[in-house]
Amino acid sequence: MKKRRNQGWVPFLLGLALLLGAWLLLKLIPGLDAEHWRVVPFLALGVGCGLFGSGAGELLAAQAMKKHPELQKQQEINQKDERNVALGNAAKARGYDLMTFAFGAMLLFSALMEADLLLTLVMVAVYLFIQFYTLWWRFKLEKEM
């Protein structure tokens, strides 16, 4: 329980720091005229909101579980249950299959729309990295079994 409570503080505080940094960049530094610098405050805002929400959710869940130890025990059992783990892995596999085809379609559309070549090449590199990572894990798991 203590581990879970402490894990929520890092994203919570990091999210707050990014939100503050985004606000400072937007309000106090008006000279962000260079095109590549205009996106930084909004990127910090988006990532900060995500981290803040994740950390706050973790902290609230830990607080709720502290008040109801029997519910915490049941949740730990459910998370470690083999059936739930198998269902989660099957859902991830289906999601990965869909992502593979959707990512391929996105690459095709990017090429057909004549998007920036660098952007298309970065997306191709990410796509190939994911595919090779999958193959690497498949070979590794086949050797173990």
Image (cartoon, helix red, strand yellow):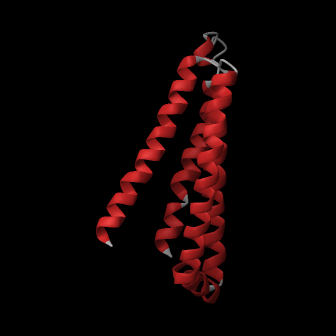
Whether residue 81 appears in this view of the structure is: no
Q: Is residue 28 left or right of residue 143?
A: right
Of residue 118 and residue 140, the one placed in the foreground of this image is 140
Percent across and percent down for residue 81 are: 54, 83
Q: Quadrant of residue 38?
A: top right
- Look at 68% across and 29% down and name the residue there: 109
Percent across and percent down for residue 78 are: 59, 82
Percent across and percent down for residue 9 are: 54, 57
Residue 18 to residue 134: above or below: above
Question: Quick one: which residue is furthest to the bottom in this view?
Answer: 70
Residue 71 to residue 18: above or below: below
Of residue 66 and residue 58, the one placed in the foreground of this image is 58
Percent across and percent down for residue 5 are: 53, 68
- Look at 50% across and 62% down and name the residue there: 7
- Look at 59% across and 78% down and name the residue there: 84
Residue 124 to residue 79: above or below: above
Where is the C terminus found, in terms of image quarters?
bottom left
How many dots with numbers?
0
- Look at 46% across and 70% down and name the residue there: 3
Whether residue 118 appears in this view of the structure is: yes
Q: Is residue 140 left or right of residue 68?
A: left
Of residue 125 and residue 7, the one placed in the foreground of this image is 125
Question: Quick one: which residue is furthest to the left in this view?
Answer: 143
